[in-house]
Image (spheres, rainbow, N blue to C red):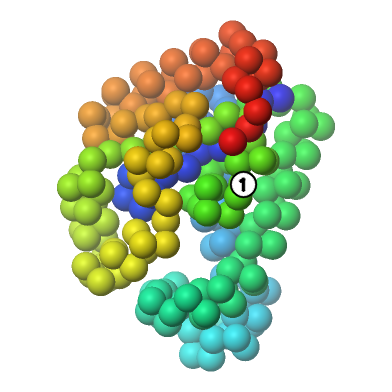
Amino acid sequence: MIVIGLTGSIGMGKSTTASLFAETGARVHDSDAAVHELYNGAGAAIIEAEFPGVTSGGKVDRRKLADLVLGDPAALGRLEKIVHPHVGKARSDFVAESRREGCRMVVLDIPLLFEIGGGSEVDVIVVASAPADVQRARVLARPGMTEEKFEAIVQKQTPDAEKRGRAHFVVETHRGIEFARRRVESIVRCLGNFQIEEFGESR
């Protein structure tokens, strides 16, 4: 089974790229969805205990939490110690189940693939990318986003140029959905025609 690690900085079109992989029949695990599950379930009480006032109705208010931890490395570190183990287990369970079911290809949508050292979990790395001005415009169009928040998030992420340099494949999302769809389809065809060893060690 080929395990693809899909990543990309904020506003680069990673989620759209993941949906394009799903269109090809690949099974996709969404790390953000695992975080939502944690925030809306049993994890809410743990996070409230660590960060009082960030929940409402038994669920984490992501905007309140972001306002609290962005720009505060110590607070962000405490949050990551809660979130990362949960998401990592969900991802491992997904891969194990997919292997048992005989899947030929799965995609792990991991926003912080490089930042958490997740390259060792995957066989092939795909990066969703776009020019910096496109990225900025996309992100600042989101509700509640500010220049300060955007800059704080970007500072925590591996630079796009480095991600592109470490990728086996890059999907340029600013060229339009059909261009991205054709690129994803070509990646799937390519991976279907080669043994994974031909790509070298996971990065």
Q: Residue at x 67, y 41 (%)?
A: 121
- In the picture provided, is 28 more to the left or to the right than 163? right
- In the picture provided, is 101 more to the left or to the right than 177? right
- Tell me where residue 47 appears, x and y as whole percent: 60, 80
- The answer to whether 133 is drawn above or below residue 41 in the figure is above
Which is more toward the observer, 56 or 176? 176
- The answer to whether 33 is drawn above or below residue 46 in the figure is above
Which is more toward the observer, 6 or 144? 6
- Tell me where residue 87 appears, x and y as whole percent: 64, 57
- Tell me where residue 190 appears, x and y as whole percent: 52, 13
Q: Is residue 2 visible?
A: yes
Determine the residue located farthest toward the bottom in the rendered image: 52
Residue 182 placement: quadrant = top left
SS of the residue under disc 1: helix
Determine the residue located farthest toward the right in the rendered image: 100
- Tell me where residue 7 appears, x and y as whole percent: 47, 42
The residue pinned by badge 1 equals 118
- The answer to whether 124 is drawn above or below residue 31 in the figure is above
Q: Residue at x 52, y 79 (%)?
A: 74
What quarter of the picture does the N terminus occupy?
A: top right
Kindly identify the amino acid type of the residue bearing the numbered disc 1: Gly
- The answer to whether 147 is drawn above or below residue 5 in the figure is below
Residue 181 placement: quadrant = top left
Q: Tell me if mark 1 has few (under 14), some (14-19) or many (20+) residues whose alpha carbon lies within 10 angstroms of its own.
A: some
- In the picture provided, is 17 more to the left or to the right than 116? left
Q: Residue at x 52, y 19 (%)?
A: 188
